[in-house]
Image: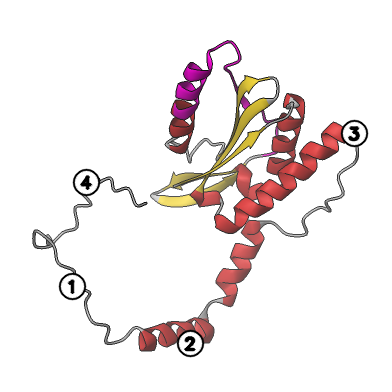
Amino acid sequence: YNLLMTARITNEIDHSALDFALTEIMTRHEVLRTTFVAINGEPRQRFSPPQPQKFIHHDLTTLEAIDQQEIEELLLRDEALYRFDLTNGPLLRGSCIQLNENHSVLMMNMHHIVSDGWSIGIIIHEFLHFYEAYVNQTESTLVDLPIQYADFAVWQKQWLSGDRLQSQTDYWRRHLANLSILNLPTDHPRPSVQSYAGKRHPLVIG
């Protein structure tokens, strides 16, 4: 459920600017400061106040190039598989792999519960805006958000109800009615209960 963004930077990195941009992003978007707790078995959102954020820094500058590559691959893999704590957060984290003075790999990782594919473009755009503002010592030109995502979610739930919800549901029931079962050939019959026990088969396509 992770959404991992990576970028290779061939220029000097301002680490204070990275921390500033990450802090501003999480201050600006309440959903990125949201965690999820269970109360009497029901999930509930918990909003945390803004607080300073820091990039995780991996300094590989003293290693040989071959060792750098191996550790970089391990760090990227570990970040992609990182297990977010939905109860305590944070659900957005930034990491920087420093290879030399002018070569770094940036990673920003979000849990899917607070983001989606559309969010990635927004995060990247605004992160770069705050980073450049810090480096150039200029004021941000982004206006405060009039609503947060939770406000939109409440509106959407209220809007998609009653006759409108029934109309939408009826539409899809009509269009998905009488679908034929997709019977793909398998080496074993499908189990009555899905086990999700799969295997991996590597294949190279030229």
Q: Is residue 151 above or below residue 26?
A: below
Instruction: In the displayed orientation, state which residue is furthest to the front.
Output: 206
Callout 3: few (<14), some (14-19), or many (20+) C-alpha neighbours within 10 Å?
few
Residue 119 appears in the rendering: yes
Q: Check disc 4 and report the residue beneath it.
A: 199
Most foreground residue, 10 or 148 = 10
Disc 2 to disc 1, C-alpha distance: 31 Å
Q: Check disc 1 and report the residue beneath it.
A: 183
Q: Are marks 3 and 4 in contact (CB under 8 Å)?
A: no
Q: Check disc 2 and report the residue beneath it.
A: 167
Instruction: Give me the disc on residue 137.
Output: 3
The answer to which of marks 3 and 4 sits earlier in the sequence is 3
Disc 1 to disc 4, C-alpha distance: 20 Å
> What colour scheme governs how the chains and residues are painted in the rendered image of this protein?
secondary structure
Instruction: Give me the disc on residue 118.
Output: none
Mark whose residue sits in front, 2 or 1: 1
Q: Residue at x 41, y 87 (%)?
A: 170
Disc 3 to disc 4, C-alpha distance: 52 Å
The answer to which of marks 4 and 2 sits earlier in the sequence is 2
* SS under mark 1: loop
Residue 179, quarter of picture: bottom left
